[in-house]
Image (cartoon, rainbow, N blue to C red):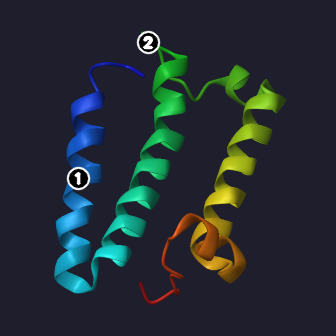
């Protein structure tokens, strides 16, 4: 992880917890913070790929394994917050589109 973005990721993730507590219960707050962390890490992949130039260049789309891993990560996150059988295992809250 690029150390310049680590404080932002930490602050962003931890700020989602009190926001979730204010809106709902602790389980919702944990699910919201976990989802924020996953999304921060999704975008951090692009920050870590290029230090001096834009990460969104032509070679960005040539990395098939990276895109497969990112798609798998997003699919697993959707399962964690939307599939009832998985939410029981990981103790997350079933989120709806309204959340």
What SS does tag 1 mark? Answer: helix
- The numbered mark, 1 or 2, whose residue comes first in the sequence reads 1
In the image, residue 24 sits, relative to residue 41, either above or below, namely: below
Relative to 88, is 17 on the left or the right?
left
Q: Nearer the viewer, mark 1 or mark 2?
A: 1
Farthest residue to the top: give it.
52
Which x, y percent locates residue 96?
Answer: 52, 87
What SS does tag 2 mark? Answer: loop
The quarter of the picture where the C terminus appears is bottom left
The quarter of the picture where the N terminus appears is top left
Residue drawn at x 50%, y 71% as measured from the top left: 92
Residue drawn at x 81%, y 30% as measured from the top left: 65
In the image, residue 41 sits, relative to residue 4, either above or below, namely: below
In the image, residue 17 sits, relative to residue 94, either above or below, namely: above
Compare residues 33 and 88 and report the one nearer the observer. 88
Which residue is tagged 2? 51
Which x, y percent locates residue 10?
Answer: 26, 41
Which x, y percent locates residue 66?
Answer: 73, 31
Residue drawn at x 61%, y 76% as measured from the top left: 88
- CA separation in Å, label 1 and label 2: 26 Å
**To which quarter of the image does residue 51 belong?**
top left
**To which quarter of the image does residue 52 belong?**
top left
In the image, residue 46 sits, relative to residue 94, either above or below, namely: above
Residue drawn at x 48%, y 51% as measured from the top left: 39
> Badge 2: how crowded within 10 Å, few (<14), some, or many (20+)?
few
Compare residues 53 and 2 and report the one nearer the observer. 2
Which residue is tagged 1? 14
């Amino acid at each position: 992880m690029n150390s310049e973005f680590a404080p932002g990721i930490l602050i962003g993730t931890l700020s989602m917890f009190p926001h979730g507590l204010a809106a709902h219960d602790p389980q919702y707050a944990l699910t919201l913070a976990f989802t924020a962390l996953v999304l921060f890490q999704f975008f951090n992949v692009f920050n870590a790929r290029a230090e001096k130039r834009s990460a969104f260049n032509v070679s960005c789309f040539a990395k098939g394994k990276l895109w497969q891993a990112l798609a798998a990560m997003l699919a697993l996150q959707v399962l964690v917050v939307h599939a009832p059988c998985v939410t029981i295992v990981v103790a997350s809250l079933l989120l709806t589109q309204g959340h």
